Amino acid sequence: MLAEGLASVLMNPICIVWVFIGTLVGIIFGCIPGLTATMAIAMFLPVTYNMAATQGISVLMALYIGGISGGLISAILLNIPGTPASIATCLDGHPLAAKGQAGKALGVGIVFSFLGTMISLLALVLISPPLASIAIKFGPFEYFSITIFSLTLIITLSSQNLVKGIMTGILGLVFATVGLAPVDSVQRFTFGNPNLNNGFDILTVLVGVFAISEIILAAETAHAKKKDEGTVLTDFTIHGFGFSLVEFKTQIVNMLRSSFIGILLGILPGIGSGTSNMLSYSVAKSQSKHPEKFGTGIIDGIVASETANNATIGGTIIPLLTLGIPGDSTSALLLGALIMKGVQPGPLIFEQNGQVVYAIYAAMALASVCMLGIMFFGLRGFVRILKIPGYLLLPLVFVLCTVGAYGINNQLFDCYSLLFFGFVGYLLEKGKYPMTPLILGFVLGNIMELNLRRSLSYSMGDFSVFFTRPMSCTFLVLAAVSIIVNLYVVYRGRKKEAQEAK
Amino acid sequence: MHFGKKLVTTALTAVLAVTLAGCGGGNKPAAKKGDVKWPKKPITFVVPWSAGGDTDFFTRTLSKYLSKELGQTINVVNTVGGGGSVASNKVKDSKPDGSTFLCFDTALALNHSCGIANFGYDAFSPVAMMGKNTGEYVVVRSDFPANTLAELIKYTQEHPNEVKLAANTGATSYYVAVKLQELGAKFNVVNGGSSSVRVASLLGKHIDVSTHTMGVIKQYLPKTGNGSLKILACLAPTRSEAFPDIPTAKEQGVDLSYDMTYNILAPKGTDPAIVAKLSKAVGKVINENPDYAKDIMAGYSAKPFYQDTEETIKTLKAEDDLYMKYSDVFKKGIK
């Protein structure tokens, strides 16, 4: 079955071509703000109906990998994350590009995206059953505790101004409460508008605060700028991937750690893709010998974010195949495609549909290689986007964002909420509030609330269970440690600054 | 700059492709004389759940064959959220021009009774019933000390509040919970999440009892899977044809039974001729197409099931009446 599965992808020229096309389209959708891997998959889903199961799933996997990997392009070049998965890539990727080293930033992102996918694929192939059993052990208590732990990242993600960071983080949590409440479906802040029942879509919030606000700001300052200002000198001659072997070697520990974080969060449905890049970034920062350099454009930050978000792909596939639980809207579509092909996920999938499973592995590997190849040659072209004047590029980005918002659920309402969050983002940007905590709060808000309420209904209102369950307690202790350590780092940094000022 | 242009072109192509995906592929409409001239445009089927669920499965399988029957593309769109109410609101308020339909299930009535939606089936112009599930099953881990639903109820009375039963507001599982408590069971009723999440929670011992359709649990049962879960009762009114050895709750003396049905609804005011034509075409696919029957058997162990508009209205009314009786309990929450 193994040979059959692998051969159905790797020995089939038509399938190879399809995987290549899938990866390319995925990258295009991933790099254009507003268009996402989810949309690409939704578009291709009907095309795959008439394909063999292995081929159809291979195309969708290629779109998925391309989509997640493509996000780094806009994050680095435009400071606009295409998906929640590449938010942390902006933090160091864009400053590095602004220094004129866009090629290097992209090269690092691409190579480590590739490595992240491959490492997670290895984990998927070799230790998927034990990883699945970890996923099963996570109940609502554990989920709640891990979200609390993740929320402590706000400190690391906003060390420039901690108070403002906490404020935007809470604002994110507040926006997450709009819509039907988890568990009992009470309407909150819907003002009788059924469109609000669903709450805000993460994409409208993300693209709104990052892209639309950026466009408004650019429009506002357009007249003030002189002609040459704003265009950065960029290294258009790039050798290889733009970074040296020595630099690569310094990142190996970072890479392995980030892969581990990516895979681990990937197997936890719902938390995965949006959080792993930020968690991995802040862990890399707090473990680093030079945390103060993070945010100024060092490759450590890009490596942490891009390795982790791609490693999450392999992690996400594990509960998808073995439990039938999709981690996000993208993998939900993959699940639908599998079921349409008569492949029922579950513990017996390896026995009953082994061929499809091995084809998925083969497609992931092949798509990663395609991604590396496409991006290697594309790299030299991507950096030239920086040469396009803003008055041509940004209106186009604006249109694409709006199209993307409409595409989420095929309703105009999402376009309005996009504009709303664009305005919110604009105001926050004006007040120099960090945006990343807002997204983190928004992503985790619902998961945290849902699992808190579930936990309390399981324990019939008893809070002590959070501490008596070992894994849950571990995460709460980690959260406390994270707060103390990170606050100390902030404190030490301020003291140092104060001394230097003297 | 050269590449920039290329990127722009590619981007525009992608956008065009998105748009075209919505209009392309139409074959010739098979319009006869005296027939209503519909569908001239692609049709949209709105599914209130994400791709991969049972309602989505029935809708997509049907549309695959129905689009050939009608000679027009059918786009299945998943508009997720609000327990289904986002989609039902959207279709209710869309233009009744025969271009948009809602493909929903028993949750339509449950939404109404829970107050998630303030309308029932009569806010629409019903088209047809496109499917009926082989029923839901009460499932526990295989080491659980009860082998029938009746034993389970007794066990909960001896160990009140210890057994966790998963139920979701606005879903059939909630009705099951309400009924079982009414029949004297003493569960700790908890929120459980989607069907596959509930299975994982059962395996991880986070919950103890849950209701499921066969497709999700097949691989965990003794004969068809690894035997980590077992079924206590079938909640359909009669035993399933596909699984005739599983006794119903009624046979065990527990008065609890319901059907999971899947319906197609049009916005109110849709031309009755369109409704009739669609309903007829749906009936033709479901009753006469052997490939359709094969697909739903493979996916959900389901048999073809179709009701015409008149019967559909009766079924929907019966469902609405049944669940509206529990409206107050649903809104208040289970104690």
Image (spheres, rainbow, N blue to C red):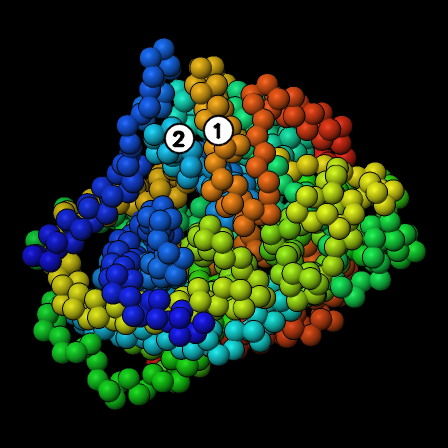
The chain under label 2 reads: B
Residue beneath the point at 26% across and 56% down: A25
| Residue at numbered disc 2 | B69
Q: Residue B323: in sight, yes or no?
A: yes
Left or right of B310, for residue A278: left
Residue beneath the point at 83% across and 53% down: B148
Please state the total of marks drawn on the protein image: 2
- Dot 2 or dot 1: first in sequence order is 2
Residue beneath the point at 79% across and 66% down: B143
Q: Position of residue B140 (x, y in %)?
A: 75, 58
Left or right of A440, for residue B241: right
Hey, which quadrant is residue B146 in on the image? bottom right
Quadrant in the picture for the C terminus of chain A: bottom left
Secondary structure type for disc 1: helix
B315 or A65, nearer to the observer: B315
Q: Position of residue B187 (x, y in %)?
A: 82, 51
Q: Position of residue A393 (x, y in %)?
A: 17, 50
Under mark 2, the amino acid is Glu
Q: Residue furthest right?
A: B158
Q: Badge 2 local density, few (<14 within 10 Å), some, or many (20+)? A: some
The chain under label 1 reads: B
| Residue at numbered disc 1 | B284
Q: CA distance from mark 2 to mark 1?
A: 8 Å
Left or right of B206, for residue A259: left
Quadrant in the picture for the N terminus of chain A: bottom left
Q: Residue furthest top?
A: B34
Task: Tell whether label 1 touches label 2 (CB within 8 Å).
Answer: yes
B271 or A260, nearer to the observer: B271
